[in-house]
Image (tube, grey):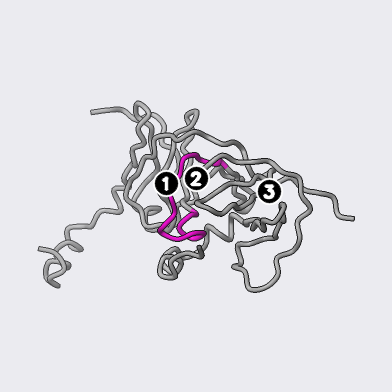
Amino acid sequence: MTDISVVQPLPTAFRGLERTWYRGLAILDGVVVPVVNPAAFLSENEATDLRIKGVTR
Amino acid sequence: MTAPKRFVLFPIGKKRFALPADEVAELAKPDLLQVFPHTTSLMAGVLVRRGAIIPVCDIAQVLVGPSAPPRRFYLIATQVAGRNRNLIALPVSGECELSSIVPRPQTGRLPEYVESLITLDDEIIEVLSLSTLMSQDSTKSSAMGGRA
């Protein structure tokens, strides 16, 4: 477990879906770590729906 | 007579391109490119420089296509987005040169991202508009195999 004290906003040059995937970027020992936005994960219902449609297993 | 303007000339493969000098912050040695999943065309990843996260935009895909040689340096430029000026790293394949030249407007059917042209000896160099270039669809460019 690591504490992240500063989350920098995703640079505006990134304009795709990643803007919803990530809350921002953190730097840990010089390594850039994307901080995931929990809302970007599929909900239980959405996952079930995709399984029913055969998109996922 | 129009006064000369300062440009930074940089090579990508066998061809040189230019950016207005006031849009260039520095030329950086190869740094650790850090990547993470994303969907934005041309973005190669990010660099960490002095604690700041700088996005890396591989404009060579548009300018010379997938056959571009390995890039050796990063040209750190400023990109104007609305009221903000953001740093962006452009991988280039060799040393850069600062030059004062009178630009001439681009003529003919050059891409929109060519802002103007400068002539140096017998070489014609395209001055790029970074904002226009970065909005290019790389899929389209790759399909055309670049412009080399």
Specify few, some or many for label 1: CA neighbours under 10 Å numbering under 14, 14-19, or 20 or more: few
Q: Residue furthest right?
A: B1
Would you identify the image quadrant in which residue B67 lies?
A: bottom left
Query: Amino acid type of disc 3?
Result: Pro
> Which one is earlier in the sequence, the residue at label 3 or at label 2?
3
Q: Quadrant of the N terminus of chain B?
A: bottom right
Report x, y in % for residue A44.
17, 58
Residue closer to the observer: A35 or B146: B146
* Residue carrying label 2: B93
- Tell me where the magenta segment starts and ends, as one range: B59-76
The residue mark sitting in front, 1 or 3, is 1
Q: Residue furthest left?
A: A57
> Which one is earlier in the sequence, the residue at label 1 or at label 3?
3
Label 1: chain letter: B
Looking at the rendered structure, the secondary structure element under dot 2 is: loop
Report x, y in % for residue B68.
44, 54
Query: Amino acid type of disc 1?
Result: Pro
Residue closer to the observer: A50 or B25: B25
Q: Residue at x 81, y 49 (%)?
A: B4
Label 3: chain letter: B
* Residue carrying label 3: B20
Q: Is residue A35 above or below residue B106?
A: above
Check if mark 2's residue and mark 1's residue have beta carbons within 8 Å. yes
Query: Amino acid type of disc 2?
Result: Ser
Q: Is residue A38 above or below residue B141?
A: above
Check if mark 3's residue and mark 2's residue have beta carbons within 8 Å. no
Looking at the rendered structure, the secondary structure element under dot 1 is: loop
> Which one is earlier in the sequence, the residue at label 2 or at label 1?
1
Q: Residue at x 61, y 67 (%)?
A: B112
Looking at the rendered structure, the secondary structure element under dot 3 is: strand
* Residue carrying label 1: B70
Q: Is residue A52 above or below residue A34?
A: below
